[in-house]
Image (cartoon, rainbow, N blue to C red):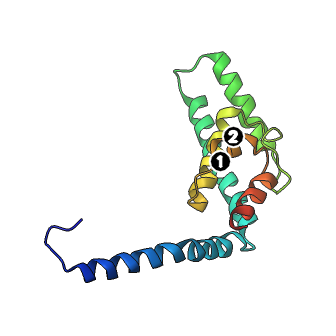
Amino acid sequence: MYRVLRPASLFVVRRTFIAHHAYQAPQVWSAAVRRFCSSPDVERRVISAVEEFIHGRKAELQADLSSSELSSDDKKKSQKILDKLNELPAVTGDLSWEKAGFDEIDCVEVLLKVEDEFKHEMPDEVADNLKSVSETVAYISGLGK
């Protein structure tokens, strides 16, 4: 937006500059995305985000169990989920959300952790179809292609 009158030639130069860089921007951005997504530590970062979610979920469940506000039925459910999380072996690429005992909300929350890790928002259609660590790694790795 211009508040003062400028010579027409300056406007043309600025417009050409903007058009030129706007044309090159997709090339620059796609190269950056390729470097970002092709790094060998994508799987490690996804696993780290999943482990962080599991750790936080365990803390929530332990707090629920020590709360006096929950009914005995809710405490039993919380204990069952906590036991399932405690029985999980180390998180690997083979871990599915079902095998981890994640419900729909847990699936959403774990993918939000992954989104935070990679500073990338997944479309809902994609996120709804990701059912494991390996599928999530494949999606993130394929961003730059």
User: Is residue 113 in view?
Assistant: yes
Whole-Å distance between the Cαs marked 1 and 2? 6 Å
Q: For the N terminus, give its image quadrant.
A: bottom left
| Local secondary structure at mark 2 | helix
Q: What is the quadrant of residue 31 in the picture?
A: bottom right
User: What is the x, y in percent for residue 135?
Assistant: 79, 52
Quarter of the C terminus within the rendering: bottom right
Residue 91 seen from this side: no
Dots 1, 2 in contact, CB < 8 A: yes
In this picture, is 99 found above or below 38? above
- Residue at image mark 2: 107
- Above or below, 75 against 33 in this view is above
Q: Residue at x 36, y 75 (%)?
A: 15
Q: From this viewpoint, which residue is outermost toward the right?
A: 94
Specify the label residue 20 is tagged with: none
Please tell me which residue lies in front, 75 or 56.
56
Name which residue lies at 75% across and 42% down: 129
Viewer-side residue, 125 vs 55: 125
> What is the crowding at mark 1: few (fewer than 14 residues within 10 Å), some, or many (at least 20)?
many
In which image quadrant can residue 139 be found? bottom right
Q: In the displayed orientation, state which residue is furthest to the front.
A: 8
Compared across the picture, whether 69 is left or right of 11 comes to right
Q: Position of residue 24 (x, y in %)?
A: 53, 77
Judging by the rendered image, the residue that carries numbered circle 1 is: 111
Q: How many marks?
A: 2
Residue beneath the point at 18% across and 77% down: 6
Rendered position, 125 above or below 24:
above
7 relative to 35 in the view: left or right = left
Q: Tell me the kind of residue under disc 2.
A: Cys
Estimate the x, y position of residue 124 in percent, counting from the top left. 64, 42
